[in-house]
Image (tube, rainbow, N blue to C red):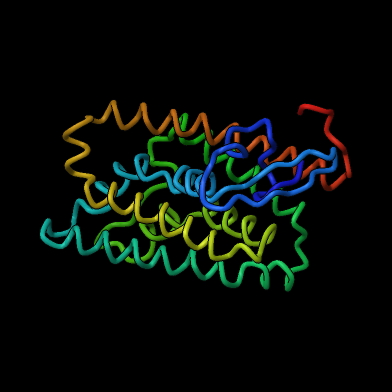
Amino acid sequence: MRDGLGGVSPGCSFGRVFAGRPRHVVSTSGEYTTMTILSAIFLLFLVMDPLGNIPLFLVALRDVNPRRRRVVVARELCIALVIMLGFLAGGREVMRLLQISQDSLSIAGGLILFLIAVRMIFPPEEGIFGPTLEGEPFIVPLAVPLVAGPSSLVTIMLLVSREPDRWPGWLLAILCAWLASAVILLSSGWLTRLIKARGLIALERLMGLILTAVAVEMFLNGVREAFAVVPPAGA
């Protein structure tokens, strides 16, 4: 089932969330489905995983002067935003240059999201993206890959490649998801004291479960489109 994301079918909750100006797309089965700005915001927020990143940010900033921590976090968040906007602006050209089809990107994106979601549910000791470096972080690992990670960048490329004329909406979705993530990460110390470590773990695993379903749906839709398989009615 083809839609604005290239991976969310009408059976998935993201395809039915209301927002902004949803665009109708005719599917191969003759049904109409929509990809809304709100669903894009929610999906991007999931893949940015700010709640799961709180412990990793705290570990990465442990050797940084407490007075500089907010400054460092704000700087890394701005770098991550610039990178994501760069993929929004040039993602289609990169795909065209490398001759990557939308179906291939949908399948690869589904696999990447699935791997990230599994690591969110069963996090390794060194964190989702591996051990962090010592000293004050710069770009790695806070901006990339914790905020602007592979799952976020692939999702952005999928959005703009499927419906490039809706780039203002995708820009708004990126800004809103980034702003929500920034508020959470800048308040990481306060949130840790409020909901404790167990609460953060529970929320991250819940987000991982939701992201797993999205990843599987994205992968299956990529396979359907690549092999021109029409899903059964009501799927």
- Please name the residue shown 87% across and 37% down the image: 230
- Please name the residue shown 28% across and 26% down the image: 198
- Residue 141 x %, y %: 38, 57
- Please tell me in which quadrant of the rendered image residue 30 appears: top right
- Please name the residue shown 79% across and 42% down the image: 223
Residue 10 or 228: which is nearer the viewer?
A: 10
Residue 18 falls left or right of residue 77: right
Whether residue 108 is visible here, answered yes or no, is no
- Residue 37 x %, y %: 53, 51
- Please tell me in which quadrant of the rendered image residue 145 appears: bottom left
Residue 149 or 126: which is nearer the viewer?
A: 149
- Residue 94 x %, y %: 67, 70
- Residue 74 x %, y %: 27, 62
Residue 192 falls left or right of residue 94: left
Q: Which image quarter holds the N terminus?
A: top right
Q: Which image quarter holds the C terminus?
A: top right
Farthest-out residue, left: 67
Number of marks in the image?
0
Residue 155 falls left or right of residue 148: right
Residue 126 or 6: which is nearer the viewer?
A: 6
Whether residue 200 is visible here, answered yes or no, is yes
- Please name the residue shown 29% across and 46% down the image: 184
